[in-house]
Image (cartoon, coloured by chain):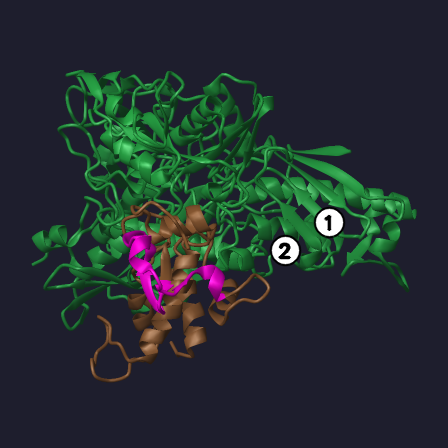
Amino acid sequence: MLDIDPRTSILDALRNHIGLTGTKKGCDHGQCGACTVLVNGRRINSCLTLAVMHDEDAITTIEGLGEPDHLSPLQAAFVRHDGFQCGYCTSGQICSATAMLDELQQGWPSHVSADLEAAPDPTDAEISERMSGNLCRCAAYPNIVDAIREVAGGGK
Amino acid sequence: MSSEFVMDAPDPRNLLDHMAQDLTGAPLDRPEGPLKVSGRATYAHEYRLGNCAYGVLVRATIAKGTLTALGDEAVRGLPGILGVFSDDRFLRNPAQGTADKAPVQGAQTIAYLGQPVALVVADSFEQARHAAQSLALRYAPDADGVFDPESDAANIERPDAKQRDQGDFDRAFADAHATVDSTYTTPAQNSAAMEPHASVAAWDGDRLTLWGGYQMLKYNRNELADSLGIDAENVRILAPYVGGGFGSKLGISPEAVAAAIAAREIGRPVKVAMSRQQVFEATMRRSETRQRVRLAADAQGRLTGIAHEYRVSNLPDESFSEPVGQATHFLYGGENRRIVHEIARVNRTCAGSMRAPGEAVGMLALENAMDELAEQLGIDPIELRKRNLPERHPEQDIPYSSRMLAQCLDEGARRFGWDKRSTKPGTTRDGEWLIGMGVSSAARKNITSQAEARVTLTTDGDAVVETDMTDIGTGTYAVLGQIAGDMLGLPRDRVRVMLGDTDLPPGPGSGGSWGASSSGSAVLEACAVLRRQLADRLGLVADGLVLRDGDIILDNRRIPLRDAMGAGPLEAVGIFKPGKTSQDYAQAAYGAFFAEVGVSSITGEVRVRRMLGTFAAGRILNAKTARSQCIGGMTFGIGAALTEELVHDLRDGHIVNHDLAEYHLPVNLDVPQIEVHFLEERDDQACPLQSKGIGELGISGAGAAITNAIAHATGARIRTYPATLDKLLAVME
């Protein structure tokens, strides 16, 4: 049980109280995606929601997806494809991509889907569109797309 | 022992090409990658110290004047509040890169809106933030603020050393067969590194330890000590991981000094992270520019004259001014040359270095003007550029070091399919989209800087590389390990690289694209000493020493390196210093950018469909990280061309769009699968690695390829960056 100030966001609870600093603060306003975590499997900006609103929720952070010597397939693909440089947006990118692949699997359409009824393919355009809420100033975008495509088993 | 290498003459030894391990240049993964992708790499704000307090900076809400009271009466009694700090040591703005001393100080004198004037410290971040927002600051405002660099009230400086007047430009322009006279503007920009500036300060007696997001620790240590009025010997800065910099973390910035002052006062460690809005307002911006470019050419398109006259801005008492004409000095020929460099003093956020200061914005104008000339003369833009590559530096009359610009243009053209480009603008359509192709040269001045590194061969026969050099995403951990591994014949995983700690030998820091060449040369020198020491130990000649896979290879046998280390570890410090080759040769890295855009004939929206860069920057140290650097630079080019613009309110100079929702960085879908190709090159004049800087090359000219493509697509040229849809709609038919 965590006893914290009701003004504390999930992001600050993780970083300042629980000691899980893998989740990053880039803007604190839901504009950059660096703080993306999974709440009950769904990706959210953890800076935009208060910890007290998530009693009993299952929150997965980057630390929960893999460890340095036991990486998740996406984490390993990010290393292989150099899907990051400074590494600060990376936790958010990978958490976001993890949930995004689920959304694809479940057939959610996106802004670039030509057919809202058909099961979407993990094309570069679909991946890029669905990852556009995660900013990367080093601009590893093409490498991020390569990494995700490889894991999604998609073709260019 | 230590050994110094001064770059006074070309170094044709090409040492790395004679090693047996074949690591340097290989597209190896970053060794710190697993830590970064699993959230275990620790950035400045993330060090957990016992009893740490949280500080939140408070911004001035007037543009110029004096702070007369903090108005903290209501705040001081709140639970958990530990103090409100504001004093003469506070920084007005960050130090400029390599300043090595404190910038302008003092919280009372306000020079721009958003200047940090106080720090509120509390037990929790939430309470500190609440109190910071509750201060009732009181001021005596000044009425003489200047907010517009084009205003008549602005003090305009024209430093002699930054002007150039060669031959008779006016005459050349009057006599020319063809001329271009165009004025371009580029807006102020922000580096917008993903990690906001942050520091954790902790004192142990008189000794200060600071964990900070910084690029140049050797300088930052002196800047921090000078700001606090203490001895630099008593300051240690750690920055093993930095969440991007792009110039914005070159100099010590306000949060570090405020955290140190507060930590000392309350006797507890203090953490301060800037909010994203504070990063926009109170760190550094790239200056806006107004640039008039005039070209004079003969009928074949050969330049007879070139003039680049520009105005940039900065706060009073700042030494830095965007060197817009930097590439214009050396890129193209023409004997009559004029460069006019004006600085307007304004009350706006401090201007400083952002990725490729000078070239990043200067080449937008120069490379657009070259296309305007090509269009006018009916000459292919690539051909026009190739006709204007001078034999020697057109102003200094010195030879170039390696320069493969023409080859980059040709190779890029071939790969991009330039021959499919229509010669007439505005004639290719794809449904509602007007399609165009554009090209631009890439050029970035090559600079090196003094660097030291210590390399130790341990008794296990492994190597440890140590320097206070930083890796801000640039690949330092990767490339220094590759160089040491090559020189010592060790697989990459037997070399450990330790960075970002001022207790280690001083490196040059990350800036000016000089880090890899300078620090890498220091590592090379240290390893060369170790090879000699090892050879001595074995009674061999160092030159003939073959080291591979952790073994010493003799005629018919292999001795594990470990076996030679029984007598104890070997250690050497390598020192690299720039020398005469910096003055004797015009050094730059080169390349070419190609872009294909679609412009919606209905909305004016621009999409970059394809983008390709070819680059020659001497030896490429790691093909994977170098490619990533170039992709990153080209994406900055996309932002500069299409979306990025800091908007200043002309009434008080404040930055209107001070967050990532309103300042538009390129997002994933804005960036195509960019192609990057390197041409094989060695530059003996640059450094002993034969490498040149690459971190800024990818932005230097990139945006111009996009705006040239827009002009080709639409027949309309936007000279006011960025080329947003409102501007395009106004000029498209």
Chain B, which colour? green
Q: Is residue B285 magenta?
A: no
Question: Does the magenta-highlighted stretch encompass residue A62?
Answer: yes
The chain letter for the residue carrying disc 1 is B
Q: Is residue B620 left or right of residue B524?
A: left
Residue furthest out toward the right? B539
Q: Colour of chain A?
A: brown
Q: Badge 1: how crowded within 10 Å, few (<14), some, or many (20+)?
A: many
Asked if residue B604 is positioned above or below residue B354 in the image, the reply reads below
Pointer 1 with pointer 2, Cβ within 8 A: no
Identify the magenta region. A38-65
Q: Secondary structure at mark 2?
A: loop
- Residue B303 sits in quarter: top left
Q: Name the quarter where the N terminus of chain B is drawn.
A: top right
Q: Which marked residue is nearer to the observer: mark 1 or mark 2?
A: 1
Q: Residue at coordinates 51% horizontally, 42% vertically from top-left? A: B47
Question: Residue shown at 77%/40% (left/top)?
Answer: B571
Image spot of residue B618 (x, y percent): 55, 50
Q: Amino acid at mark 1?
A: Ala
- Regarding residue B172, the answer to whether it shows in the image is yes
Residue B111 position, x and y percent, is 26, 21
**Front-most of residues B476 and B81:** B81
Q: Is residue A88 depicted above or below B433 in this figure?
A: above
For label 2, the crowd category at 10 Å Cα-Cα, with few meaning under 14, some 14 to 19 and many 20 or more, is many
Q: Which residue is mark 2?
A: B24
